[in-house]
Image (tube, grey):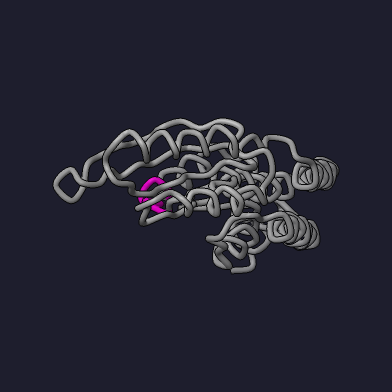
């Protein structure tokens, strides 16, 4: 038994292993914290945040266990191939944060502490900068407008005039007849100049004679359908 223990300590001192685990925990917690603070969606998952930290510990453990031994690496890869990961991540950003946590664990496991610390700092600062800046927000004031109006050119022309005056741009998405052709159901993709213009648009459309089922769905990048 003592021989086995001595053989294990020949590869890596327990103080170094403990330092690697602590660093992986601290840095992955930092990544998880920035993920939580910069998250903008609706489907927040506490399990995902905790998985970032636990995944970093596991990846650090694997790198320490493998070391420079190729046979160990092949064995661990073969063991992991048996496990099937079926978790679906709806947001690619979640995948990036998870991969960053795993990368921190790998860097800590191979005792590349400077790379782990600098990489985590740069990653978190860039994530914070992207969260604060409007970079990538192209659909800020987009929306989906749905309503039903009586068949006939008068109602259609009235709606078209309102859309031309109250929206920056509009595109007809779908049109179908309902109630045996007495009404038509319309869906428009609209782009507004300001976010508060949707209230003015709705109030103008409510004045159209016979309109019903009027609804506006905001399609900002922070909304998940």
Residue 55 seen in this snapshot: yes
Question: Is the N terminus in the top left, top right, bottom left or bottom right quadrant?
Answer: bottom right
Looking at the image, residue 188 lies above or below residue 4 = above
Q: Residue 167, position in %: x, y? A: 59, 37
User: 53 or 107: nearer the eye?
Assistant: 53
| Residue sitting at x 58%, y 67% | 46
Q: Tell me the chief SS of the magenta region.
A: loop
Look at the image and say whether residue 206 sits in the magenta stretch. no
Looking at the image, residue 19 lies above or below residue 141 = below
| Residue sitting at x 62%, y 62% | 49
- Whether residue 38 sits left or right of residue 88 in the image: it is right
- Whether residue 189 sits left or right of residue 25 in the image: it is left
Q: Which residues are magenta?
A: 80-87
User: 212 or 137: nearer the eye?
Assistant: 212
Q: Residue 204, position in %: x, y? A: 54, 49
| Residue sitting at x 83%, y 46% | 121
Look at the image and say whether residue 81 sits in the magenta stretch. yes
| Residue sitting at x 42%, y 54% | 214
- Whether residue 65 sits left or right of residue 175 in the image: it is right
User: 65 or 45: nearer the eye?
Assistant: 45
Residue furthest left as drawn: 180
């Amino acid at each position: 038994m003592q021989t086995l223990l001595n053989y294990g300590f020949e590869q890596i001192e327990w103080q170094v292993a403990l330092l690697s685990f602590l660093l992986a925990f601290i840095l992955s917690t930092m990544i998880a914290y920035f993920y939580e603070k910069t998250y903008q969606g609706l489907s927040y998952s506490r399990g995902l945040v905790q998985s970032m930290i636990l995944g970093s510990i596991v990846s650090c453990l694997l790198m320490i266990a493998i070391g420079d031994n190729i046979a160990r690496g092949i064995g661990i890869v073969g063991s992991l191939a048996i496990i099937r990961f079926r978790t679906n991540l709806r947001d690619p950003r979640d995948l990036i944060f998870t991969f960053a946590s795993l990368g921190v664990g790998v860097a800590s496991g191979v005792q590349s502490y400077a790379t782990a610390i600098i990489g985590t700092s740069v990653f978190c600062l860039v994530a914070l900068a992207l969260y604060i800046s409007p970079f990538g927000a192209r659909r800020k004031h987009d929306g989906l407008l749905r309503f039903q109006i009586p068949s006939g050119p008068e109602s259609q022309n009235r709606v078209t005039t309102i859309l031309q005056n109250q929206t920056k741009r509009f595109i007809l998405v779908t049109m179908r007849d309902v109630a045996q052709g007495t009404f038509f159901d319309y869906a428009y993709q609209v782009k507004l100049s300001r976010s508060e213009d949707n209230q003015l648009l709705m109030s103008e459309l409510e004045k159209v004679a016979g309109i019903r089922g009027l609804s506006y769905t905001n399609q900002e990048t922070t909304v998940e359908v």
